[in-house]
Image (cartoon, rainbow, N blue to C red):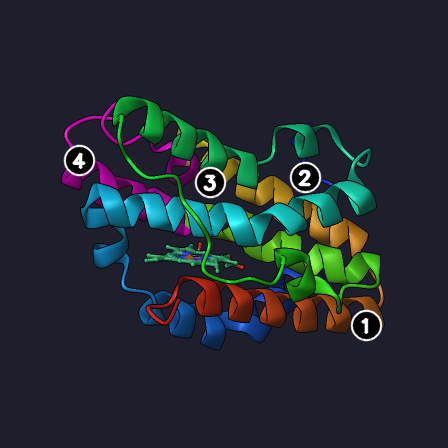
Amino acid sequence: MSLLADNNNSDASSALKLGTDDLHRQVEASIDWKANLEGLGSYRQFLGKVNYFLAPTDRIIENHFGESADWFKTRRTSAWAKSDLDDLAAAHTGMEPFRHPDPQTADQLYLWVKKPADAAGILYVLEGSTMGSQFLCKLASANFDSTVDAPVKFLNAYGKDTARRWQVTKHWLDGFLRSEDEIATAVHAARRMFQIYGDQLSCRK
Ligand code: HEM
């Protein structure tokens, strides 16, 4: 039987989509993707920033849901961006190591995370962003000579499996977030995660 067949309740994933749609559009438009992905230097900056601000989210999700389901073990994490960063440095000797300009630790960005529903809202944004990554991966791949020149493990996300995995994530969220209170908390957390994403990757940093 299909994993999705027994669940007709899509309250949580629908509420998350509706409750963050404005920010999805705003964040997507606020980041200069072309500038981030067109030169090796700016791509290195992009991967470094992603690795910086997503690393704490991986710990948060691991702490709350580490043992919840098998697919968590193969999630795209900040380590995928770090691996691209390392491969990039290996392919281009002499490239300077990335140093994030922000002196505060990225953990400070997530001090508001208290409940499992907060972590679920973060998970929604991170996993949903794999859908947009497919588009960005094509953009990056068109700009660089090859994946040796510029590795795209992070942007490629789950490749051809990305859309299916997104359905699995939504199914999991729908099963996990049951009460109105939990759903409202997750929407609030997802909005904060979108804002962090936009703040960290917009031109100001
Ligand atoms: C140029 C950049 C981006 C493009 C072109 C893009 C495009 C898309 C597309 C086509 C979908 C699938 C919509 C659907 O199935 O109805 C999607 C979903 C999603 N994206 Fe993006 N996206 C981008 C950037 C981002 C970023 C930066 C984030 C996170 C900060 C993000 C978060 C999400 C989320 C959470 C969903 C799931 C929406 C739902 O509930 O179905 N996206 N995006």
**Residue under label 3:** 163
Specify start and end residues of the magenta stretch as a single range: 132-156
Q: Nearer the viewer, mark 4 or mark 1?
A: 4
Q: Amino acid at mark 3?
A: Ala
Residue 95 in sight here? yes
Q: Nearer the viewer, mark 2 or mark 3?
A: 3
Badge 2: residue crowd in 10 Å (few <14, some 14–19, many ≥20): few
The answer as to whether callout 3 falls within 8 Å of ligand 1 is yes
**Residue under label 2:** 5
Quadrant of the rendered image containing residue 174: bottom right
x and y percent of residue 65 in the render?
79, 42
Quadrant of the picture in which ligand 1 is shown:
bottom left
Q: CA distance from mark 4 to mark 2?
A: 41 Å
Residue 144, labelled with which disc?
A: 4
Q: CA distance from mark 2 to mark 1?
A: 23 Å
Sequence-wise, the earlier of marks 4 and 2 is 2
Q: What residue is at 47 percent from the left and 50 percent from the top? A: 50
Q: What residue is at 46 percent from the left and 29 percent from the top? A: 83
